[in-house]
Image (cartoon, grey):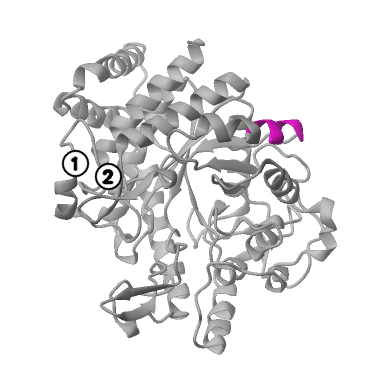
Amino acid sequence: MTASDTHTTQLAVPDGTRTAGGGGPAAWSPDSWSPDSWRGRPAAQQPDWPDPEELRGVENTLALRPPLVLPEEILDLRRSLAQVAAGEGFLLQAGDCAERFGSCTEAGVRGKLRVILQVAILLTYGSGLPVVKVGRIAGQFGKPRSRPTETVDGVELPAFRGDIVNRPEFTAEARRPDAGRLLSAYHHASAALNVLRALTLGGYADLGQVHDWNQEFVRRSAAGQRYETAADDITRALRFMAACGVDTRSQAALHQVQLYTSHEALLPQYEQALIRYDEKRRGWFDTSAHMLWIGDRTRRLDGAHVELLAGVDNPVGVKVGPSTGAADLRELCERLDPDRAPGRLVLISRLGAGRGGELLPPLLRAVRDAGHTPVWACDPMHGNTFVSESGYKTRRLSDITTEVAEFFAVHREEGLHPGGIHLELTGDDVTECLGGDLDEVLDTHLASRYETACDPRLNAAQSIELAFRVAEFLREQRSGV
C-alpha cells in the first residue's frame, strides 16, 4: 500500500495521550504515554542536529504527510506473526544493511525483491509453512555507529549515519547532519513502496518464475547436486498443480505476494512525526513501516526508543545481543508487550557463531517462563563481523550458516519453534561477505565490488545458498531429526 491509499481509514495527527490499544503499555500507566513522551528520556545514537529550528520545521511538515502504510496492513502483519509465534509460520526479514536513496528505483527494488522471493520459496519448501515476508526496505535509511566520529589523516568528522542523516563523502559539508534529509527519506520510502506494490501485485512474484530463478542457481553452482533434491521436489509439486489444472499465473496466492516493510526506529523525531491515531481501532500506529525494531545499542529500558515504541500497535522487534541478560530481556518484554499478545513482539538474537549454545537457552527460558510468546528470529549477520587481512569489514558465509544451525539446535532442545531469520542481503553481485559455492568470494576479491553503505551484505548467490541450507534445517526440524 502506498502513501496515496489513505481513504480506507481515519487517521489523526498525534496530539494527545494514549487511551487504548491492543499493543500498548497498559501495565505501566497508559495515560502517561503520548507520541512525544520519549522526549523526556535519554536517546542513544542520535546525530548532533546543528539547527533545532530547522528540525522542528521538518517534523511539523512530516506530521502533515499521508501515512506510508495503513493500520489494517499493520494488523494483518500482527495476525501473521501470531501464527508464526504459534509454530504455524516462519518469518523472513531481509534486505539492505542501510538503504541508499539512490537504490529506491525500479531496478533497485526489483533486485532486492527477487532475492527475497527466491529465499522465501525455499523456506516455504523446507518448513511446509507459510513464510511471512518482511523487507528491510522503504525506510532502512539510518544506521547506528560504534563511534560518533570518524578520523582520516588526522581529520575528525561526524560519522556517516545513513542517507536519512548525512552523506558518506568525507567532507565537512557532507557529514553535517541535515534535517531536510528526513523529508527526503519519506519521499524515497514512498517511491520504493509504489514500486513494491506494482511488482508484488503485477505478477513478478509468480511462483513458477521464482522457482526458475532458483533452478538457474542450482545449474551453475559447484555444489548443485546438494540442492537438486529440493529443486526437483518443487518442480514436481508445480507439475502436479499444473496437471490438476492449477495455473500459477491465474491464482492470486501463487501469482502475487504480500511483502511488509520494516526498519530500525533509530530517529525518534522521524517516527513520532508519522505516528497516527486510528479512531476506528482506538490505537496509535507508526505509519512509517509495518514493523519497527529497536537495536542492540538502543534497547535501554528507560531510553527514548523503548518509550516511543511501547505505545504504538505495530509489531516491534528487539535485537538481542551477547550483553543481554535474562532479567533485562524479561523487563523489556514486559514493557513492550505487557498483554502478552502473540504477534506483538519479535526477539532477534544476534549472538555470533559458537555462542548460541551457551547464551540463547537462558534467554529462551526466561521469556517463556514469564508467559511471553514472541517470535524468536535469528540474525546471524551482526555477531559475525570482523576486519579481514585486506582491511575490509566482512563476514564469512560459513559463520552465518553456523549461527543459524545453532539457533535451530537450541530451539529443538528447548522444545520451542525457531520462528525466523533476519538477513542483510542484496540482489546485486557484490563482494562483501566471504565464501559461497557459486563464484566464491575470497579476501582478495573484496575490493572488486565492495559497495555497502555500512555493513557487508550477502550477495544474491550467497543468499540462495544460505536459503537452501536453512530449508534443510527446517525440514529436519519438521521431521524431528
Residue 146 at x, y = what percent?
A: 45, 63
Residue 224 at x, y = what percent?
A: 20, 21
Q: Residue at x 35, y 46 (%)?
A: 199
Q: Residue at x 55, y 69 (%)?
A: 270
* Foreground of the two, 86 or 472: 472
Left or right, residue 204 beside residue 382? left
Residue 332 position (above or below residue 269): above
Which class describes the residues within 10 Å of circle 2: few (<14), some (14-19), or many (20+)?
many
Label placed on residue 210: none
Q: Secondary structure at mark 2?
A: loop
* Foreground of the two, 153 or 300: 153
Residue 130 seen from this side: no
Residue 237 at x, y = what percent?
A: 34, 14
User: According to the image, label 2 marks what residue?
Assistant: 433
State which tag comes first along the sequence, 2 or 1: 2
- Amino acid at pointer 1: Val
Whether residues under marks 2 and 1 lie with C-beta atoms below 8 angstroms apart, the answer is yes
Q: Would residue 368 be counted in the magenta stretch? A: yes
Q: Quadrant of residue 67?
A: bottom right
Q: Secondary structure at mark 1?
A: loop
- Looking at the magenta stretch, what is its main secondary structure? helix
Q: CA distance from mark 2 to mark 1?
A: 7 Å
Residue 257 at x, y = what percent?
A: 43, 38
Residue 272 seen from this side: yes
Where does the magenta region start and end?
364-370
Which class describes the residues within 10 Å of circle 1: few (<14), some (14-19), or many (20+)?
many
- Amino acid at pointer 2: Cys
Q: Residue at x 59, y 41 (%)?
A: 347
Q: Residue at x 54, y 28 (%)?
A: 418
User: According to the image, label 1 marks what residue?
Assistant: 441
